[in-house]
Amino acid sequence: MTETQPKASHFIDGAYVEDTAGTPIPVIYPATGQQIALVHSATDAIVERALISAKRAQKEWATWTGTERGRVLKRAAQIMRERNRALSILETYDTGKPLSETLYVDATSSADALEYFGGLAGALTGEHIPLGQDFVYTVREPLGVCVGIGAWNYPTQIAGWKGAPALACGNAMIFKPSETTPLCALKVAEILYEAGAPAGLFNVVQGLGDVGAKLVSDCRVDKVSLTGSVPTGRKVYAAAADGMKHVTMELGGKSPLIIFDDADLENAVGGAILGNFYSSGQVCSNGTRVFVQEAMVEPFLRRLCERLDNAVIGDPMDEATTFGPMVSENQMTIVEGFIAKGQAEGARLVYGGGRVAREGFFVQPTVFADVTDDMTIARDEIFGPVLSVLSFKTEEEVMARANDTQFGLAAGVFTADLTRAHRVVAGFEAGTCYINTYNDAPVEAPFGGSKMSGVGRENSKAAIEHYSQLKSVYVRMGDVEAPF
Ligand code: NAD
């Protein structure tokens, strides 16, 4: 039996701490609607403790060698992998995502980040810039105290993706999980401490947006990394700008997935399934606008619907289940609203479209055809299992339509013509692109968006630039020539 109630709401300075004066936040298991835990939002006193201990721990951590820091991260990765099953069960309780997913992409992905950045930590250096007999050398320094703010779809992964590069670079992190999924990040904090991170180096505080806002505006915070929606991103970016803080913004999307009629049908359908129904569609980079070339539309829809019949919707803890509930009742209602709008605006419902007749927040995998560019379901981020098929004739036409969005997180193309694939990708206004695949996110590759979908990149060596800064040191070997 997994213990879902944490020892206390927050993890600060190497220990669980509680302050029941904070607003209660009930934790609901999305598959049943039952409360499985209760945490409290951080009070000012809790936020203060987190900031003081992070500031102190960062000073100590920055004196460690990169190799020593990396060793802690790699040890944490190892502990995480050893506990993968328990962590995955907790992730399933927190989010409702089926165990058949969480066993493979949550704690494991967080562990990948810890391992990858643990490996890089000892290799982070500045450079030597010769200037005749003089020279400049650069020192790669940490930023200081970083704040990570998470969305609810991948709570363990987001904590790892933000924490690992931050710590590798010598920073401390205060992480505020989404109030919808507060449980998993506490385990990440516990494991990092157990692996040898100084107390206070990775703190977790619970809370709603006001706690996030408090952290972002504190002058002791040097960097903010948010995973969330565009409206929240705007607010957080503006608040961070006030204090001239570094930011990473991983925001929403409405990504195009283009399927040309020469594409392998099975692979294209598989890509569309991965890009729309994994995690019940609650993935920021999903390719929800599926542009299918005219001749391919009906075969694509037929095969997609056949394969959707194979989805096993049910108890997320049963490893045979491949499709779980929405994260919350609120999210379920939002998705139902979009489905109703799709029908009202004239899209053709070809699959699903309703709730699943069982307890919990289940919405059926849903497919709309005959979707046009101006429909709400083709313009707004739904963040649920709703796939829209839009037909197109030519490459030129579809590129203009694919890019006609404020978002720029991801984009994909399926075609047998590799020259065309590269041409299409070159034309995409998006940060993360796919050719004949969709939604892979290995830690080795940069991940992030352009346009309104974000600023900065997570994962890969690129993340180092967002968690460190360079100090330039000019060295003169001869005399100083002053004008007077
Ligand atoms: P959200 O924007 O409602 O909340 C995100 C986080 O910000 C939460 O922890 C919330 O408490 C906090 N927050 C809210 N207001 C704040 C404020 N004023 N100051 C500081 N913090 C504040 O997003 P959500 O509903 O939790 O997640 C869904 C969204 O996240 C979708 O738009 C999705 O596309 C996006 N997302 C993006 C990525 C990515 O990597 N690009 C990944 C996952 C989710």
Image (cartoon, rainbow, N blue to C red):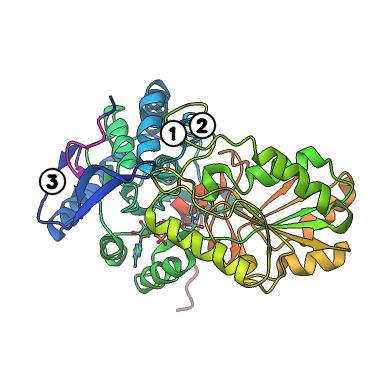
In this orientation, which residue lies closer to the viewer: 134 or 364? 364
Q: Is residue 310 left or right of residue 303?
A: left
User: Which class describes the residues within 10 Å of circle 1: few (<14), some (14-19), or many (20+)?
Assistant: many
Look at the image and give the residue range highlighted in magenta: 3-12
* Whether residue 177 is situated above or below residue 347 in the rendered picture: above
Could you say which quadrant of the image residue 309 lies in? top right
Residue 8 on the magenta segment: yes
Q: Callout 2, which amino acid?
A: Thr
In this orientation, which residue lies closer to the viewer: 83 or 457? 83
Which quadrant, please, contains the N terminus?
top left
Residue 42 place in picture, x, y as percent: 19, 55
Secondary structure beneath dot 3 equals loop
**Mark 1 vs ligand 1: CB below 8 Å:** no
Residue 38 place in picture, x, y as percent: 20, 46
Q: Earlier in the sequence, mark 2 or mark 3?
A: 3
Q: Tell me the number on the disc at residue 163.
A: none
Residue contact between numbered discs 2 and 1, judged by CB atoms under 8 Å: yes
Residue placed under numbered mark 2 in the picture: 321
**Mark 2 vs ligand 1: CB below 8 Å:** no
Q: Callout 3, which amino acid?
A: Glu
**Mark 3 vs ligand 1: CB below 8 Å:** no
Q: Could you tell me which residue is drawn at 25 percent across and 61 percent down? A: 211
Residue contact between numbered discs 2 and 3, judged by CB atoms under 8 Å: no
Could you say which quadrant of the image residue 96 lies in? top left
Q: Earlier in the sequence, mark 1 or mark 3?
A: 3
Residue placed under numbered mark 1 in the picture: 315
Which callout, 2 or 3, points to the residue nearer the camera?
2
Estimate the spatial distance between the alpha carbons at disc 2 and disc 1, rounded to whole Å.
6 Å
Q: Callout 1, which amino acid?
A: Asp
Q: Tell me the number on the disc at residue 18.
A: 3
Outermost residue, front direction?
357
Q: Earlier in the sequence, mark 2 or mark 1?
A: 1
